[in-house]
């Protein structure tokens, strides 16, 4: 998986610490190298990560290399975006989307 600029990459080994133990909501993108829509989403994730750094942590996980986490959260399509708050998934979105739409979909999560 080609990491998005300004976005951390997590693995099965550090997912719990980096995502479930985070002090703010976390947007996780499940993606893969071969996934065209995942590549489309990379600049969107980079922009959101920079713009919302104080309210939201953004990370990526390679679905092919981290089957344990993929299975745990029932990810069937790529890209899948899951938002975690206090260690629990609170929102799921499938597919690439423009920055404005993603921010609109995240607004209620970010304002709580």
Image (tube, rainbow, N blue to C red):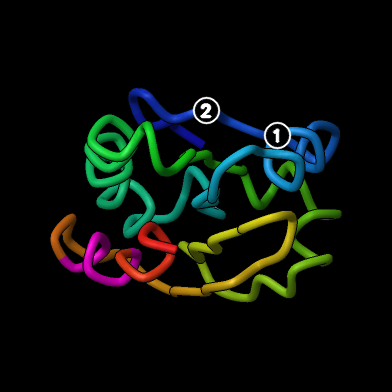
Identity of the residue furthest to the front in this view: 112
**Is 64 in front, or is 61?**
61
Task: Identify the residue at image location x=52%, y=74%.
Answer: 92
In the rendered image, which quarter is residue 14 located in?
top right
Task: Give the camera-side residue of 62 and 72.
Answer: 72
Judged left or right of residue 43, residue 57 is right
Q: Residue at x 30, y 71 (%)?
A: 105
Can you identify the residue that label 1 sits on?
18
| Image location of residue 11, percent across then percent down | 73, 36
Above or below residue 20? Residue 98 is below
17 vs 88: above or below: above
Q: Is residue 15 above or below residue 94?
A: above
Numbered label attached to residue 36: none
Secondary element type, mark 2:
strand
Which of the two discs, 1 and 2, labels the residue nearer the N terminus?
Answer: 2
The image quadrant where one finds the C terminus is bottom left
Residues in magenta, as a range? 101-106
Q: Position of residue 75 (x, y in %)?
A: 66, 71
Q: Given contact means CB atoms under 8 Å apart, are the residues at marks 1 and 2 in contact? A: yes
Q: CA distance from mark 1 to mark 2?
A: 9 Å
Q: How many marks?
A: 2
Which of the numbered marks, if any, corresponds to residue 8? Answer: 2
Label 1: element kind: helix
- In percent of the image, x 30 and y 65: which residue is there? 107
Q: Is residue 49 magenta?
A: no
Residue drawn at 75 percent across, 40 percent down: 21
Q: Position of residue 56 (x, y in %)?
A: 43, 43
Quarter occupied by residue 86? bottom right
- Residue count near mark 1 (Cα–Cα under 10 Å), binned few <14, some 14–19, many ≥20: some
Number of the front mark, 1 or 2: 1
Report the residue that reaches farthest toward the top. Answer: 6
Image coordinates for residue 95, horizontal then vertical, percent: 37, 70
């Amino acid at each position: 998986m080609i990491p998005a600029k300004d976005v951390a990459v997590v693995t099965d080994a550090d997912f719990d610490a980096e995502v479930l133990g985070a002090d703010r909501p976390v947007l996780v993108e499940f993606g893969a190298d071969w996934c065209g829509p995942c590549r489309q989403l990379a600049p969107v994730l980079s922009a959101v990560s920079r713009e919302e750094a104080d309210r939201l942590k953004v990370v990526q996980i390679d679905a092919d290399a981290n089957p344990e986490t993929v299975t745990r959260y029932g990810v069937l399509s790529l890209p899948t975006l899951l938002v975690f708050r206090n260690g629990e998934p609170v929102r799921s979105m499938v597919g690439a989307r423009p920055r404005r739409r993603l921010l609109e979909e995240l607004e209620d999560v970010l304002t709580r």
